[in-house]
Structure formats: C-alpha cells, structure tokens
Image (cartoon, helix red, strand yellow):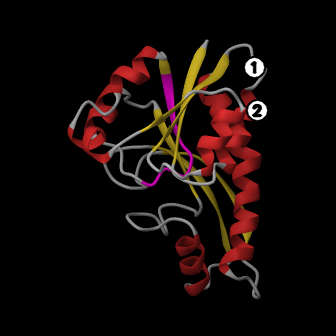
Amino acid sequence: MKNIAIFASGTGSNAAKIIDHFREHEKIKVVMVVCNNPSAKVLDIANENGIPSLLITKERFFKGDGYLPELRAKQVGLIVLAGFLWKIPQTLLGAYPGQIINIHPALLPKYGGKGMYGLRVHETVILYKEKESGITIHYVDEKYDNGDIIFQATCPVLEDDTAASLAKRVGGLEHRYFAEVIEKILS
C-alpha cells in the first residue's frame, strides 16, 4: 500500500477529488489530511470521509520536527500539496526527497512564487493578456513553485474573462487531472 498525506489550507475541493479517486484503490490510500487553518473546510471533508486530520502550528512545522513522527507513523510515502499555503521546511524536504508534489493554478514558470495563489494568479494572468492558462503539477523544492514540472494542462483565457471565470475553468483542470497524475507517479 502506498500512503498519501494531503496538505491543504482551505476549502479542500482538490482534496475531496483525490480522496474520492482513491477511495476503493487497491494500492493507494489517503491516510491523513494535514492543515494549518482550524476553520478550513478541508477538515470537514477529512472527517466526513473518516480520514484522520492533523492541525499544525507554524512553530513546530518550521522550527521543530515538521511533524515527521506523525507522517512516519502513518507510513506516508507521498505528500500532496493541494492548496497548502505554507512553504515546505527543509526538515520535510530532506525526509521526502522527490516525494512532495504541488499543484499550481497557472502555467509555471510564469505566475508562481510567494503570494501567487488563488485569484491573484488569475488576475495576473488576465492583466498580462495571456492567451492561455492552466495547471502545473510539480515536485516541491526549497523555493515556491520552482521544482521540476511533472504535468501541465491548458485552457484558453477568454477576452471577457474575470479572475473568477478563469479560476472556474482552471479548477476544472485541477479536478480532472490531479488524482490521475498522482496515480501515475505512484504506479
């Protein structure tokens, strides 16, 4: 069995799709949801699906053991960042080399980096008059949105797009491809 921990900070729409995708999988299982926001909807999703959740603090995450004991106790083999807004500390990068992936709502290397998340990304894509946007799934390293690209999918940016309308199309790509790419990585 290959065990996944999903790290998320918000609504958990990608986490829900991943959990649903692997619910009956014979070889891959979501064993934990890790969250840094006590009011995040992703905690409800974990609870509704019978998946243990771990609420983390900045102090221990960045200056302590990075919650490695809890991850090891669940035999986590892949960490999936699905809307997790904290940078991953060296403690976890060292313990999970090539085993931490992220999804970004734009075509990296453009429109990534610190502070580039949510509607800000889509607003910037529109501001710079890009003809297409999409998703990037990539390995995580010590810099925001910098690791090797695993997969990208695109969608058009329409002339009348708002950040919200573009976000909806990009979100559709996330929901369509993220779990599928995770499965390929682990197979």
Give the image location of residue 12, x and y in percent: 63, 48
Relative to 177, 39 lies left or right: left
In the rendering, which numbered label is found on residue 21? 2
Vertical placement of 12 versus 171: above or below?
Answer: above
Where is residue 31 shown, x and y percent of the image? 58, 23
Q: Are marks 2 and 1 in contact (CB under 8 Å)?
A: yes
> Is 145 on the left-hand or right-hand side of 94?
right
In the image shown, does 105 or 15 lie closer to the viewer? 15
At a point 63% along the width and 54% down the height, the residue shown is 11
Tell me the quadrant of the picture where the N terminus can be found.
Answer: top right
Q: Nearer the viewer, residue 3 or 154?
A: 3
Picture quadrant of residue 68: top left
Residue 139, percent from left and from top = 46, 41
Q: Residue at x 76, y 32 (%)?
A: 21
Front-lying residue, 32 or 151:
32
Asked if the stretch drawn in magenta spans residue 109, the answer is no
Name the amino acid type tagged 2. Answer: His
Side (left or right) of 76 relative to 153: left
Q: Residue at x 77, y 47 (%)?
A: 176
Is 81 contained in the magenta span?
A: yes
Location of mark 1 (residue): 25
Residue 164 numbered mark, or none: none
- Provide the secondary structure element on which disc 1 rests: loop
> How far across and down, in percent of the image, does residue 99 sit?
45, 30
Give the magenta range: 77-85
Within-10-Å neighbours for mark 2: few <14, some 14–19, many 20+: some
Q: Quadrant of the C terminus?
A: top right
> As shown in the figure, which amino acid type bears the numbered disc 1?
His
Give the secondary structure at mark 2: helix
Classify 115 as above or below 89.
below
Q: Residue at x 73, y 41 (%)?
A: 17
